């Protein structure tokens, strides 16, 4: 008999998502009296909209309006909770078998998707924060398997959860001690120079290697570089939470996954409420419902960041903007994109709300031989949405094949 599936805990952290949704919707009721009296601060609203709403509030019967607001808040809360329960009870489980392991060191493995393919070799480098299978989500939504179908020879780095000696790893350890040997193993296996492709933080980590190693080409997918390029909005938000985050890291030795998820949730406090409310209306057996569950399972399967990596990201990247200022050191050397000689492709998703497009665009000004694409996709959508193949993957596979011998 098969073991029962472990219960889903998401959306993580659940108390935060519930609190933000309840606070947002119930605040409408609390804001009604000052809104009617004219004492509510409308400073951030469009003047015409604020005036029209003020007039509508003045015409409405107070008790009826309060009842309507309460009814609507209760309906939205009910939809959100129904979506969460539907997600937790959904029968979908990811059962996609991994391809063979090319090499392994600690928790880090390199998966070889190419089989007997003889096409261009490409090493896919994901972020340290989320699991690597966003690039191999389902049989029909797997960037790695798509590249294989297009005749390429993809390899995927799986970082895994840090354990053993990795609990003390910093970025140098991951980049030089794990990623560089992985690149060498892939080159040896493929027998040719490799295209290095980094997604999100994986792109940032790939840049130092592209400057040091003999790679055929570099592909950057939603890669953060200038951490102040959005007007320092994200940097200021992280700075406000840095004392609490620093205490967590000091006490636990790592930054927990739920703390990371909470920071992502702060970028759009009602996103989870909107997503799960919409999911509640989907037929559970539909492809849309299964795709939603597959993606949410990945989102809720985050891993902690080691203490040294977390400090580097919070203090050096967001705090000091070291990469864009040329002061980020790997192996004692400054990471300078202008020194990367191979052809590069910088893919900047236009609808990215996790990595501000301006942060990635900075690399287009720094790399000497670069193309920049701006597909109308989001940060996660570029790897998981139904439109990704048509809007990005097909063209990207062709670019990799064309530049593999550079």
Image (cartoon, rainbow, N blue to C red):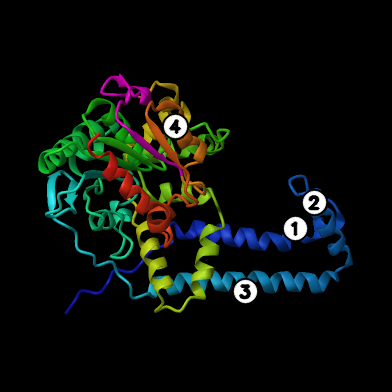
The structure residue drawn at horizontal position 43% and vertical position 60%, both measured from the top left corner, is 387
* Mark 3 residue element: helix
The residue lying toward the viewer, choosing from 131 and 226, is 226
The residue lying toward the viewer, choosing from 107 and 248, is 107
Q: Mark 4 points at which residue?
A: 364
Q: Where is residue 368 in the image (x, y as percent from the top left)?
A: 38, 25
The residue lying toward the viewer, choosing from 202 and 115, is 115
Q: Do the residues bearing badges 2 and 4 touch, measured as CB atoms within 8 Å?
A: no
Q: In which quarter of the image is residue 5?
A: bottom left
Which comes before the other along the chain, label 1 or label 3? 1
Query: Which image quarter holds the N terminus?
Result: bottom left
Q: Can residue 116 be seen in this view?
A: yes
Which comes before the other along the chain, label 4 or label 1? 1
Q: Which of marks 3 and 4 is in front?
A: 4
Q: Name the residue under label 1.
A: 31
The structure residue drawn at horizontal position 55% and vertical position 73%, both measured from the top left corner, is 79
Number of residues whose C-alpha sits closer than 10 Å to that of mark 3, classed few (under 14), some (14–19) or many (20 or more):
few
The structure residue drawn at horizontal position 19% and vertical position 76%, both measured from the top left corner, is 2
Q: Mark 2 points at which residue?
A: 40
Q: Where is residue 228 in the image (x, y as percent from the top left)?
A: 52, 31
In the displayed structure image, the side of residue 4 where residue 351 appears, left or right: right
Q: Name the residue under label 3.
A: 75
Which comes before the other along the chain, label 3 or label 4? 3
The structure residue drawn at horizontal position 55% and vertical position 63%, both measured from the top left corner, is 274
Q: In which quarter of the image is residue 174?
A: top left
- Disc 4/disc 1 C-alpha distance (Å): 45 Å
Q: Magenta stretch: residue 97 in it?
A: no
Number of residues whose C-alpha sits closer than 10 Å to that of mark 2, classed few (under 14), some (14–19) or many (20 or more):
few
Which comes before the other along the chain, label 2 or label 1? 1
Q: Do the residues bearing badges 2 and 1 touch, measured as CB atoms within 8 Å?
A: yes
Highlighted magenta segment, given as a residue range: 329-348
């Amino acid at each position: 008999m098969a073991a029962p599936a472990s219960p889903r805990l998401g959306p993580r952290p659940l108390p935060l998502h519930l609190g933000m949704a309840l606070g947002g919707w119930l605040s409408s009721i609390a804001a009604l009296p000052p809104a009617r009296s004219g004492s509510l601060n409308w400073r951030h609203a469009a003047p015409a909209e604020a005036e029209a709403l003020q007039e509508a509030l003045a015409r409405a019967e107070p008790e009826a309006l309060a009842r309507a607001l309460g009814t609507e808040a209760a309906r939205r809360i009910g939809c959100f909770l129904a979506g969460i329960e539907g997600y937790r009870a959904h029968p979908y489980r990811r059962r996609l078998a991994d391809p063979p392991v090319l090499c392994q060191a600690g928790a880090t493995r390199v998966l070889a998707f190419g089989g007997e393919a003889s096409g261009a070799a490409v090493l896919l480098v994901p972020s340290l924060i989320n699991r690597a299978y966003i690039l191999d989500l389902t049989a029909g939504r797997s960037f790695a398997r798509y590249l294989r179908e297009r005749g390429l020879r993809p390899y995927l780095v799986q970082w895994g959860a840090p354990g053993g000696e990795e609990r003390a790893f910093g970025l140098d350890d991951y980049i030089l001690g794990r990623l560089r040997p992985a690149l060498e193993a892939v080159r040896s296996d493929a027998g040719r120079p490799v295209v290095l492709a980094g997604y999100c933080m994986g792109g940032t980590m790939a840049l130092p290697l592209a400057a040091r190693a003999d790679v055929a080409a570099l592909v950057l997918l939603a890669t953060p570089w200038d951490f102040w390029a959005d007007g320092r909005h994200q940097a200021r938000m992280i700075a406000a939470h840095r004392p609490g985050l620093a205490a967590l890291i000091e006490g636990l030795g790592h930054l927990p996954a739920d703390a990371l998820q909470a920071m992502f949730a702060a970028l759009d406090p009602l996103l989870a409420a909107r997503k799960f409310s919409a999911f509640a209306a989907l037929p559970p057996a539909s492809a849309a419902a299964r795709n939603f569950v597959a993606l949410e399972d990945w989102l809720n399967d985050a891993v902690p960041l080691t203490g040294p990596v977390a400090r580097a990201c919070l203090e050096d990247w967001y705090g000091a903007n070291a990469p864009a200022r040329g002061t980020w050191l790997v192996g004692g050397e400054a990471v300078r994109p202008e020194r990367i000689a191979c052809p590069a492709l910088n893919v900047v998703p236009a609808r990215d709300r996790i990595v501000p497009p301006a942060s990635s665009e900075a690399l287009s000004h720094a790399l000497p031989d670069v193309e920049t694409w701006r597909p109308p996709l989001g940060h996660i959508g570029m790897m998981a949405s139904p439109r990704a193949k048509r809007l990005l993957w097909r063209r990207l596979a062709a670019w990799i094949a064309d530049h593999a011998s550079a």
